[in-house]
Image (cartoon, rainbow, N blue to C red):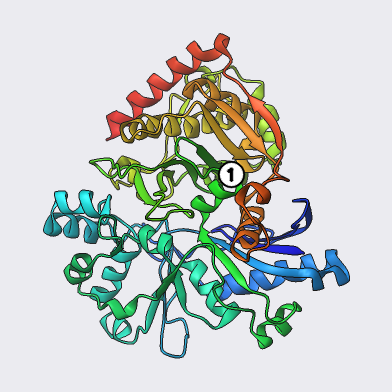
Amino acid sequence: MLLLGIDLGSSSVKVSVMEGKTGECRASAFYPKDEMKIIASKPGWAEQDPEAWWSNLKAAVADCNKQLGDEKKRIGAIGISYQMHGLVVVDKDFKVLRPSIIWCDGRAVEYGEKAFKTLGKDFCLSRLLNSPGNFTATKLAWVKENEPELFGRIHKIMLPGDYFAMRLTGELLTTYSGLSEGIFWDFPGNSVSGELLDNLGFSPDLLAKAVPSFSEQGTLLKKIAGELDLPEGIPVSYRAGDQPNNALSLNVLEPGEVAATAGTSGVIYGVTDQKKFDPLSRVNTFLHVNHSEVKPRLGVLLCINGTGILNSWLRRNTGNNLSYDQMNEMAEQIPAGSQNLTILPFGNGAERMLGNKDIGSRINGINFNTHTNAHLFRAAQEGIVFSIRYGLDIMKETGINPEVIRAGAANMFQSPVFREALSCISDTEIHLYNTDGSLGAARGAGIGSGYYNSAKEAFSGLKEVGITKPDKSKTGAYENAYNAWKNNLESVL
């Protein structure tokens, strides 16, 4: 059987089709080929049109079908991964009422701060394990106050992946993990938080029914099957936010295991069985995809908004039309520390790690006689790595202290400079695997549909493709550069 995985990111929609038995990727495509448009009509805002998501999904599926030919008839299950914390609202006819307010939109910060004060720190941290912050619940609070007529027409709210599942199956559902990422979940009560809903003035009827991440969540509608040229009745049997799904894709399911990504944003995601939290909510705790009451599995997430988007910005604006490989090669020619040039990569909205502050990106220490584009390319990668190190120090307070970080061989992890700097500054081994979010969603579909008898069977085709170990001869240079970077950051904060 073939398994189809969808990864709805903020840059593109990627679809991969995997041979279930071997784990071989049989087809893969992403659209658009340039980055998807983010609507920023006001500073700090970030919206996307769900219909554009759907159009890109159709294009990616059509491309995969072309690669597969008649083999597409063997597709037997669909899994969905999606950008976390977004808000999609629909009316009773399942029509979208406004553009999606996506993960990096900062307009709801003050609503989260108000809820944190009125609900109380002890309640929020002991029961929600987070501040309400700038998540889905407080994005909805913004809509309620600023678009009251539209709010009155909302039938259900959903996350971006719930929207895709609704379009595919006609079923309007969410997951327990998804409710926790929206900060609706009461962890000790193992249910939606009535106190939070009351505080924000929401009816529980606005929330969709929740199902496990691994479960049959509807089947492909006849009309949609015709639109996508896929067999009718294929089950959607898995959905998860992109970071829990990335962890799944790397077989990070047990306490102590840690996964990382570095696409548009950068994330470290560690699994624990303890209900621990950061008292300042700079890192956040959610239900993991394999959580159960009997075997608790929670994910502690460090998110840095400005990672690959900084690299992308440099590529567009340095004027040389270079490829990322060329940028990486140039960065490798510059010594560790970028000859005292430092970059703070925080130019993509309010950063949770910085207390929901939006400080913008900063370039410090440019010498017009010394520094070149190559220095900028290296300093950008080091700045991203240093922000991860800054967050890892926070994560240690919650019990996440990795010796190994697993990542897919994609995005910034393709850069030798990035891998070396992260390994040295965090004193960890970086293990790369032949997977990505869309393949993780495909494996999840196989687990949720019952095609695989166990997780072990699902990951039999997962292969390690590289290891980077700390280079002790360079650790001192990276530590010195990190300390200078940290001083720059703290002077801004």
| Above/below status of 202 relative to 430 | below
Q: Residue at x 65, y 33 (%)?
A: 415
Closer-to-camera residue (81/296): 296
Q: Residue at x 58, y 45 (%)?
A: 312
Quadrant of residue 116 in the image? Answer: bottom left
User: Can the viewer see residue 379 in this picture?
Assistant: yes
From the top left corner, tell me how far across and down residue 461 is, in percent. 73, 46
How many numbered tags mark residues here?
1
Q: Residue at x 68, y 80 (%)?
A: 233
| Quadrant occupied by the N terminus | bottom right
| Above/below status of 133 relative to 260 | below
| Above/below status of 419 relative to 356 | above
From the top left corner, tell me how far across and down residue 342 is, in percent. 46, 27
Closer-to-camera residue (48/195): 195
Q: Which residue is mark 1?
A: 251
Closer-to-camera residue (189/388): 189
Q: Residue at x 16, y 53 (%)?
A: 123
493 horizontally vs 288: left or right: left
* Label 1 crowd bin: few (<14), some (14–19), many (20+), radius 10 Å: some
- As shown in the figure, which amino acid type bears the numbered disc 1? Asn
Closer-to-camera residue (143/373): 143
Furthest residue in direction bottom, as rendered:
93
Secondary element type, mark 1: loop
User: Can the viewer see residue 351 in this picture?
Assistant: no
Furthest residue in direction top, as rendered:
473
Quadrant of residue 334 in the image? Answer: top right
| Quadrant occupied by the C terminus | top left
| Above/below status of 395 relative to 117 | above
From the top left corner, tell me how far across and down residue 62 is, in percent. 76, 71
From the top left corner, tell me how far across and down residue 174 is, in percent. 44, 70
63 horizontally vs 457: left or right: right
